[in-house]
Amino acid sequence: MKRWNGWGDVTKIYPLPQSGARYLAGEVGTGQPTPDARIEEVIACVPPSRLAAHPLVQTEAEERLRHARGQSLPDWIALRSGRIPAFPDGVAYPTCDEDVRSLLQYASSTGTGLIPYGGGSSVVGHINALPGQTPVLTVDMSRMNALLDLDRSSLIASFGAGVRGPDLEAALKPYGFILGHYPQSYEYSTLGGWIAARSSGQQSYRYGRIEDLFAGGHLETPQGGLELPVVPASAAGPDIKQVILGSEGRFGILTRAAVRIRPLPQSEIFLAAFFPDWESGAEAVRAIVQADIQVSMLRLSNAQETRATLALSGREQLVDLADRGLPIFGYGPDRCLLYYGLTGSWTQVRFARRQTDALIRSHRGVLIPFVIGELWRKTRFTTPYLRNTLWETGYALDTLETALPWSEVLPTALEVQDALSRGFEDQGERVLAFSHLSHIYRMGASFYVTYIFRRAPDPDETFRRWQVLKQAASQIILHAGGTISHQHGVGVDHAPYLPVEKGVLGMEMLESLRWSIDPEGILNPGKLIEAEDGD
């Protein structure tokens, strides 16, 4: 069963090794855990539903609790403390377009807000019910999850928008195909959610971001259905698909989506290398991408993340090997770890490996001939479970990300990391912050920052600390000209910063489009666009 107040399956546990506990204690202090609210206590606080009866709507308290929040740190603080300011008034599970149409009509006639819900993996507040007088209905799309059509000659597959990542790939594999979209939330996130939030997968350099994969589909709106035709390319005016991408449910509920697929690759390997410092590693990955070498993934950790990754992994033999072996090559504490993936035919992978390894060596990199890269592949979707363990040990963990041109990405990443690390100096509290470059482009890269700090005994103080850190980092990103979100979307947490990126006219265009589709403001109110609905 899925956890109601944390990440993932309740039966999966990622233990914190003793070496990791010692490392965290040395970096930020010993964690001081406080008890979490029990589910029975929180269920008892769920208020009566305000919804009128409808055959598709469930109003049981536990069902509403399990759909009340996502996976952001503010969500965790609310769920773990039991201090949840608002719950959906009901949950519906449509199974077809007609069901979604019926729910939209119901919402319009009763003045109810509708929140589209995929896998509940949002980390910026996309799916949260907000306090207010308007009743809210969460529309869980998980039962619209089938493979609907497979065009083998055109390499197009159509699915119900509620299909989760593992189920999507499992449906394609017997036919010899793959989509290849692997966000960190892959275990629970859905195709519709990826499209709604403009998701990016770990191997996007080969397979593309979701906007490269989304070929068309069907949207249900308060003004009727909208078919998004599947064609190879079109010059027939602006592409409506690009408007739906990243719209976060404000412009309609996506019920089915066609995606561009590929044949399963013959070969795939994940490898690792060390560099003496982050700058050398960044120059290497830039050179690899700008040489058009067919890698599928490049992920370069800075020195702080390299140390944290090794310490928290529990694999002390790897730490010992790095400590004893790398100084031979003149590598000190600034050493950085690169993971890279090669995917394709046998010939493509062999050729790409020779090219990549040569560029790594030419930038003072040392190739690791054993299984660090393969260990990363095996654990890449289990590491989020460490967040549960850290919370229960007394630590809060959050992430943020952006994308910038090459000239700005490293200086900005270091400035953000420094601001986070010094965020609570006046309180005598420390923050462990570390970064990696994860999605590499010819013109620049995204950087992804993880930060860990001790939870306060009072949940409100833990939330306040998060606000301080989030605001400081966001202001630095905006000042540098970075995007406020490279892959997590906008939701609630990034909405205050979106006007800086879009501009006044851009925000007016989005609001005008939203109003033309949803004049009553029933679709995911309060998300993406901070504006009064129903004007």
Image (cartoon, rainbow, N blue to C red):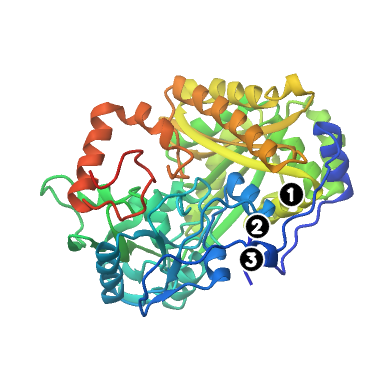
**What secondary structure is found at the residue carrying circle 2?**
loop
Q: Are marks 1 and 2 in contact (CB under 8 Å)?
A: yes
Residue 45 x/y as whole percent: 61, 61
Residue 320 coordinates in the image, percent (x, y): 87, 41
Residue 65 at x, y percent in the picture: 56, 63
Callout 2: few (<14), some (14-19), or many (20+) C-alpha neighbours within 10 Å?
A: many
Q: Is residue 469 above or below residue 68?
A: above
Classify residue 70 by image quadrant.
bottom right
Query: Marks 1 and 2, how far apart in space?
Result: 9 Å
Residue that carries the numbered disc 1 in the rendered image: 391
Where 296 falls versus 361 (above or below)?
A: below
| Residue at x 69%, y 63% (from the top left corner) | 41
Q: CA distance from mark 3 to mark 2?
A: 19 Å
**Circle nearer the viewer, 3 or 2:** 3
| Residue appearing at x 56%, y 65% in the figure | 66
Residue at 80% in and 33% down: 28
Residue beneath disc 2 = 6
| Quadrant placement of the N terminus | bottom right
**Quarter that holds the C terminus:** top left
Q: Are marks 3 and 1 in contact (CB under 8 Å)?
A: no
Residue projecting furthest to the bottom = 55
Sequence order check, earlier mark of 3 and 1: 3
Q: Which numbered marker is on residue 44?
A: 3
Give the amino acid at mark 3. Answer: Ala
Res. 442 in view: no
Q: x%, y% of residue 379?
A: 68, 57
Classify 10 Å Cα crowding around label 3: few (below 14), some (14-19), many (20 and above): few
- Three-letter code for the amino acid on which mark 1 is drawn: Trp
